[in-house]
Amino acid sequence: MQADLRSGGPENLVSTTVGAITAHIRNEELGPGDRLPSEAQFSKDLSVSRTVVREAFRALAALHLIDLSPGKRAVVAQLDYGSMSLLIEHGVVTEQITVQQIYDVRRTIEIRTATLAALRRSEAQGQKIVELAKGMQASRDDTQRLMELDIALHLEIAKAAANPIFALIVGAFDGVTRQTWPIGWRSRTTEEQQVFMLDIHVRLGEAIAAGDPTTAADLMAKHFDESVRALIAAGIS
Amino acid sequence: MQADLRSGGPENLVSTTVGAITAHIRNEELGPGDRLPSEAQFSKDLSVSRTVVREAFRALAALHLIDLSPGKRAVVAQLDYGSMSLLIEHGVVTEQITVQQIYDVRRTIEIRTATLAALRRSEAQGQKIVELAKGMQASRDDTQRLMELDIALHLEIAKAAANPIFALIVGAFDGVTRQTWPIGWRSRTTEEQQVFMLDIHVRLGEAIAAGDPTTAADLMAKHFDESVRALIAAGIS
DNA sequence: CAAGCATAACCTGTATGACAGGTTTATTAG
DNA sequence: CTAATAAACCTGTCATACAGGTTATGCTTG
């Protein structure tokens, strides 16, 4: 069950301990917020040093499977895209992933989230999505704020799709988006292009709020087609 | 850049060190296989104990951003879905994700991989995909082998899509699939159902090998519709 | 001078012990 | 019974030590 078995990696004490900890979570049917035994406890039970247990804890914390904080016991964590975001960033930094590939994946995923969001969004979510889109329109001059709203909007749509995995994947691209977004925006040199981009977001938000899955999906597709054009225009490979 | 900033978590020495290591990878423009400085080196440069550096290394190894092995220096790792697989398993075990949600995501993603694979597969990949599908047909009585071939087929299609992120996501569901697959298969009680399921895979493989994206996407969609029906029939929520 | 081999230097995996500072639990005083 | 206080516990970090695997150095030999 542990990573090293899957990757065929070498078997060391830390991996074994990681396996024991995840097994504990499974066997005790722990859920988010539940507390784990202390490091000393695992150390005694598994007959390994506290050093090893600590490194195992740290590994699980890196994956956000558990949360650590000083003095307190480790607790089972809620799903979080932080680790996936790091993974994707690593892929981009080491040139194993291109920005265009990310956009292809996002396009695929987010057309679906738009559809689902239109079908399943709550009243409050629909309202928030429209607000974010209109907030973008109002922030055309504040690039930083505009970007944050854009990212928040896409994530909110993913959340409204009521499937945490979609939110996980969309969130995974947050980090990279923060680095590439300004490039795409700068490539939209004319006011027309900028207004068009912002307009699409508003119409997308409204379609979702109105519960119109077809239009929402259509607009999301248009949005990504336009974004990819913008990136290519900016010379992003 | 490090996870803790994003999650708003507390700032401790290990997180700082993780940040320093990823910064090193970025600044030195290291790629997969390149060696990192030793633990002692980071320990000296950052003025922290080797304990801290080790825990940071361990955290990055958990995300498969680096590979560790005894005696050798840590090296920058290739993209690997092992950590995402653990994340998804954790989500299922802690009941934050349902199997149906996974199938919705997989359907979305894999319709796209089928399309792209049909467009971009190499000759060898097309051949391998067909072989895997036919191998499944020949293994109708060997459940274990059948499952492994099925998983391998889907992953191979994702690889043929020539976008590593798709392979990453498809691979992320490997672990969970191994646990739920037998349930779905057992629910296909009649020979007809089983033959139909295997037949779809072969036709899918052939469509990809033939470079027919529309048919490939269509068959992948059918495949997932049928699979979801099978799971629901088996009472999986 | 070149090639191969032995050895030394280096590196990671793990253990032990220690202590500061935060958290939880138990105890005691009101 | 409540609230304050003390004790017990827990994590974060450090230093040190050593076994065993890896790499580089330099020496020997052809």
Image: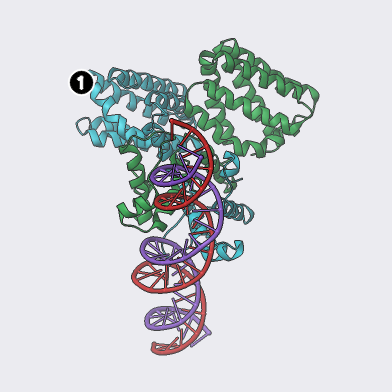
Chain colours: A green, B cyan, C purple, D red
* Residue A8 in sight in this render: no
User: Residue B222 appears in which quarter of the rendering?
Assistant: top left
What's under tag 1, amino acid-wise?
Answer: Glu
Tell me the element at label 1: helix
* Residue B233 in sight in this render: yes
Viewer-nearest residue: A144 or B206 = A144
| Residue A98 rendering spot, x and y as whole percentages | 59, 40
Please name the residue that numbered disc 1 is placed on: B191
In the image, residue A62 above or below residue B163? below
Question: Within 10 Å of the Cα at label 1, are there few (<14), some (14-19), or many (20+) other Cα atoms?
Answer: few
| Residue C25 rendering spot, x and y as whole percentages | 40, 43
Chain to which the residue tagged by mark 1 belongs: B
Q: Can you say which quadrant of the picture contains the C terminus of chain A?
A: top right
Viewer-nearest residue: A19 or C9 = A19
In the image, residue A199 above or below residue B10? above
| Residue D3 rendering spot, x and y as whole percentages | 52, 37
| Residue B139 rendering spot, x and y as whole percentages | 23, 33
Q: Residue at x 67, y 22 (%)?
A: A132
Q: Can you say which quadrant of the picture contains the N terminus of chain A?
A: top left
Viewer-nearest residue: B141 or A217 = A217
Q: Residue at x 27, y 27 (%)?
A: B183
Seen in the image, is D16 located left or right of residue A232?
left
Q: Residue at x 40, y 25 (%)?
A: B103
Q: Count the labels in the image.
A: 1
